[in-house]
Amino acid sequence: MTSKVYFMDDRAMAPEESLVAKMLTVAEAAGFDEIIEPGKTVAIKLHMGEYNNTAYLRPSYVRALVDKVKALGGEPVVMDTTTLPYLPFPSRATAVDYLKTVERNGFNSGTVGCPIVVADGFVGTDDVRLDLPEGFVLKEQYVATGFALADAMIVLSHFKGHPLGTFGGSIKNMGVGCASKRGKLNLHLGGHPKYGLKARPFNPHMCRGKECERWMLCQTCCPRYCFTVTEHSIEWNRDKCVGCFACLFVTMLCGVFGVVEDFFDVSAAGIADSALAVTKTFLPNKIGYINMAIDISPWCDCVNFSDRAFVPNLGVFASKDPVAVDRACIDMARDSIGMPGSIAEEKGAISPGIPKFSACASFLGVSENIQIKTGERIGLGSLDYELVHQKPGDPTKFLFTTVPAGLKFGPYFEKTPIYPEGGFRQLMEVPIEEVR
């Protein structure tokens, strides 16, 4: 079955062509109005950026979407979840830290126009368990309670690269971002005896022990206290490891740990499984997907930095099919030229036709097709899509005010004239050639 994906590029020469306006236009064309019912809760799923990341979507996109939901009678709530530690110094692993971080990034109830809810609770354990017999990898999943209780959802995604999923779009935003901490451990294969981080090669001889200036970080980065640094090496309690990733960028980069074969590939498939679990908490036709394919950085907004975009801005995509909308973005990125001076140039992926995300976002060149192919296989969506180029909407719908400037400011200028009597003092003949 062919799914429709509505698209507008990122060029703009008028108010109705702004990215905010285009986001609303493609959402309306995709039938998002049918998702929203008066008085019903509409979760707007959004990644609001890690501390010091700057590639995340701006609050103005969210506010426009919130205002649209309100206009249709819905009750919008911006939602996201806490993260696994991921990094040795995480900024969103508790609800308190999350809210501190996203307020710094510009997100609060005042800027977005509705409450912001951390959907999996204080430390990420507020969840609903679902059986997942259709899963390619996962046979159960844990979805954050806030999402499971919502009546409808709009998944607003920044489409970009991702070090584990190869790309991050609608499937990843929903599959990872709507999962609780238990769900994230599950989809990242925590504890898996073959593919999980506990199965990775361990090379203690690569560690210099307490002679290394970073030894204390290795000793303290693990919430499960799996590491003990000795005078000349390091000890690891493999059985206690649950794969929380807190040590990933600490011990892996110095060679103490190797990489489990197919870990990244199977994790990418698990992301699609998790996304399917999330959809099972909603009635049919109650989820819409928007991909903002702009500022396409190599890695996700969940790292605390943002590299140069490796392909140009593509535009805005909307659909009711997460597989189709992600595939449309992947295809357009592949057919695009890579950005000079970016990682695309370093990886030899400048030319159109080269899979950009496999080359530029993945550690090991993992296929960018895994998420979408798994998604089709398990019934999440379709790989067949029709790209519908949408025309700009009614310009008057995207104006700040419908009162002409003359009618608004005429009375003000009569009371407080802005043009001085006799005019301004200005040079009559300007020797512009001297500075041209």
Image (cartoon, rainbow, N blue to C red):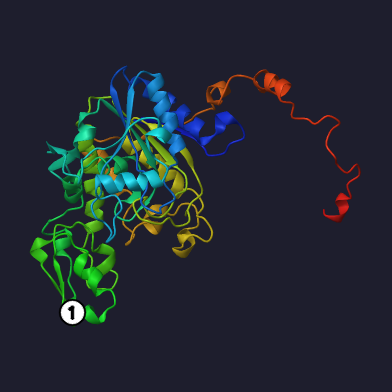
- Quadrant assignment, res 142: top left
Residue 7: give x, y in percent of width and height: 46, 34
Image position of 248 (left or right of 8): left
- Label 1, on which residue? 233
Residue 318: give x, y in percent of width and height: 40, 32
Between residues 387 and 166, which one lies in front from this camera angle? 166
Image position of 342 (left or right of 121): right
Q: What residue is shown at x 34% (from left), y 58% (from top)?
A: 362
Disc 1 crowd, CA 10 A, few/some/many (<14, 14-19, 20+): some
Residue 59: give x, y in percent of width and height: 43, 38
- Quadrant assignment, res 251: bottom left
**Relative height, residue 333 to residue 382 (above, below):** below
Q: Residue furthest right?
A: 429
Between residues 109 and 49, which one lies in front from this camera angle? 109
- Quadrant assignment, res 125: top left
**Relative height, residue 218 to residue 209 (above, below):** above
Q: What residue is shown at x 29% (from left), y 70% (from top)?
A: 253
**Relative height, residue 15 to residue 211 (above, below):** above
The answer to whether one can see residue 270 in this image is yes
| Dot 1 amino acid type | Ser
Question: Considering the image in quadrants, where does the N terminus appear?
Answer: top left
Image position of 78 (left or right of 410): left
The answer to whether one can see residue 317 in this image is no
Residue 308: give x, y in percent of width and height: 48, 56
Q: Residue furthest left?
A: 239
Count of residue discs: 1
